[in-house]
Image (tube, rainbow, N blue to C red):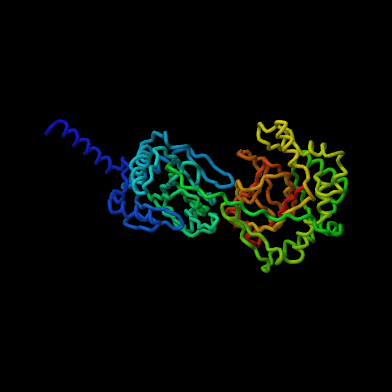
């Protein structure tokens, strides 16, 4: 035997021993089967389904595939899991998600991490390129995510320039539907907007899921409900030519209304008398003008609050689910079905006397009688245009040129009578709102009057978070507080969302003999 052949045999023997010991990542042999590859390729092109052995492909609601027993060696997978759990994880939390994530794994040197990275970047990428008939680039994003109790990733489509295929390798203990943490796939409507979950996929040990990133690839990781299980996974994206994207759908604007005529006796019947004292109103206005926000506790008179709180439990109220889920999910009352006292409270917040009250407490032009408080339009513009560096200012840097300032001032000048938009919301486990770029950015006074949330804790979610546009900085958080009126003046560069209400709220709500809390949510425009 020649020395060269002897050396090759030795190397092969060493490799086989390493594979048996689980030191080398080897993908499932089914993926090398030419018939399986052809079946997958044909099904992918036809947007059909295919199942053979460990490979399960489906194109509804969008193309996705699950490969069970992705790696041949369980010993390797267990060692990989152990290495990943030793990584440093950073808590990630914003409007869209709450979970823990490692740093990018592309440069990690640990043996098993390097092995799986080599397999995914190399052999699996080439296999996937052949099956999908797409030229996938060598550049691959990859990181490790850890979801624990109440962690969640809400509805989104994964679309970002260059992303073509998303993948997830699960390294989880035995998992059941009651544990949550499923990968949920959404159907879409004619406007390419998500509608509802039509398929939920359980994470499974050593299974790999991949799907095509497209304008309709809306999915989420449902909230993890298990208290003692960790949903560990490797995930990332293969890059390649993006699919064509249709024009962005713009939701029709919500109709606005001017104040409704009501006698001023309405606010004397409903509002805590201390807020009707002109001297106290002046103090509130001074504080509001300093910080652009204020919370007014015990706002409604106690008897009226009790009536509204009781009436909101009525089974006669029709609550309509507001979506789409990539933007929001909560209940909104059909005002034609609410009891009379709830309707009267809504009318209070829409009434002319209340517009005057808000003007007196904020200094904003929400009624023509309030305009006499200012000397001229110029002083009003100066009051409403905070300088760079002022507390609460959220204008982006570099936006202070004369031309832009003049344009901004012109945009803020009243263009007609003050208006408002108001809704009655029901907030339960699983509800939220998300930031999205189709929101019209403009100056507004936000009002929230919370009802039925006594003892609410920040850890439950459900709070309103204000952030600066294109920044992660949180400017203000408004927590639900029973019978507290929250007022926030929001400029064009300030966005807001309501944090996902998680399962830890359920026990608290049950103790209150309810499943939700409520708010009257209004926006006022000068």
Task: Pick whichever, 481 or 36, lies toward us.
Answer: 36
Measured along the vertical axis of the image, is residue 443 above or below residue 399? below
Left or right relative to 170: residue 509: right
Residue 33 in percent (x, y) is at 28, 51
Residue 332: give x, y in percent of width and height: 66, 59
Residue at 28% x, 42% y: name it. 21
Q: Position of residue 336 (x, y in %)?
A: 71, 66
Q: Answer left or right for 482 relative to 243.
A: right
Residue 152 in view in this figure: no
Query: 72 or 142: nearer the eye?
Result: 142
Q: Locate residue 101 relative to residue 51 in the image: left or right.
A: right
Relative vertical location of residue 334 with respect to residue 524 in this rendering, above or below: below
Q: Which residue is found at the position 70% from the left and 58% from the top?
A: 424
Outermost residue, bottom side? 316
Locate the N terminus by quadrant: top left
Q: Quadrant of residue 2?
A: top left
């Amino acid at each position: 035997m020649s020395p060269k052949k002897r050396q090759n045999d030795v190397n092969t023997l060493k490799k086989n021993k390493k594979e048996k010991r689980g030191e080398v990542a080897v993908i499932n042999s089914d993926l090398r089967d030419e018939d399986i590859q052809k079946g997958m390729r044909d099904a992918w092109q036809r947007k059909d389904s295919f199942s053979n052995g460990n490979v399960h492909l489906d194109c509804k609601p969008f193309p996705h595939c699950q490969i069970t027993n992705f790696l041949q060696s369980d010993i390797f997978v267990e060692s990989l899991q152990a290495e990943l759990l030793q990584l440093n994880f950073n808590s990630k939390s914003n409007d869209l998600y709450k979970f823990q994530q490692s740093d990018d794994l592309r440069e990690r040197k640990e043996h098993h991490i390097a092995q799986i990275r080599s397999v995914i970047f190399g052999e699996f990428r080439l296999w996937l390129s052949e099956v999908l008939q797409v030229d996938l680039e060598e550049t691959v994003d990859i990181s490790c995510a850890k979801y624990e109790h109440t962690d969640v990733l809400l509805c989104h489509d994964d679309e970002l320039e260059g992303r073509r295929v998303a993948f997830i390798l699960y390294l989880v203990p035995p998992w059941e539907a009651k544990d949550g943490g499923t990968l949920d796939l959404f159907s879409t409507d004619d406007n390419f907007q998500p509608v509802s979950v039509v398929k939920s996929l359980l994470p499974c040990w050593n299974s790999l899921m991949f799907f095509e990133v497209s304008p309709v690839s809306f999915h989420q990781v449902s909230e993890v409900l298990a208290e003692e299980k960790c949903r560990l996974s490797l995930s990332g994206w293969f890059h390649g030519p993006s699919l064509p994207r249709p024009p962005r759908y713009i939701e029709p604007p919500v109709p606005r209304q001017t104040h409704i005529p009501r006698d001023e006796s309405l606010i004397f019947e409903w509002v805590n008398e201390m807020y009707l004292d002109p001297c106290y109103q002046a103090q509130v206005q001074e504080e509001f003008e300093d910080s652009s926000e204020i919370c007014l506790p015990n706002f409604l008179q106690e008897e009226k609050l009790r009536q509204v709180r009781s009436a909101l439990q009525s089974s006669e109220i029709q609550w309509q689910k507001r979506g789409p889920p990539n933007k929001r999910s909560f209940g909104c009352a059909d005002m034609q079905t609410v009891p009379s006292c709830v309707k009267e409270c809504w009318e209070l917040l829409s009434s002319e006397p209340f517009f005057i009250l808000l003007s007196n407490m904020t200094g904003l032009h929400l009624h023509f009688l309030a305009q006499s408080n200012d000397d001229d339009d110029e002083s009003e513009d100066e009051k409403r245009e905070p300088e760079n560096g002022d507390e609460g200012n959220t204008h982006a840097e570099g936006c202070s040129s004369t031309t832009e300032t003049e344009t901004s001032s012109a945009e803020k000048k009243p263009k007609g009578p003050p208006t408002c938009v108001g809704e009655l919301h029901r907030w339960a486990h699983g509800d939220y709102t998300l930031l999205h770029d189709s929101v019209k950015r403009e100056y507004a006074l936000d009002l929230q009057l919370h009802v039925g949330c006594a003892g609410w804790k920040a850890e439950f979610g459900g709070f309103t978070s204000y952030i600066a546009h294109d920044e992660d900085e949180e400017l203000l958080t408004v927590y639900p507080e029973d019978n507290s009126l929250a007022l926030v003046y929001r400029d064009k560069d300030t966005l807001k969302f309501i944090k996902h209400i998680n399962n830890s709220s359920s026990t608290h709500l049950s103790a209150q003999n309810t499943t939700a809390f409520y708010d009257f949510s209004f926006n006022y425009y000068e």
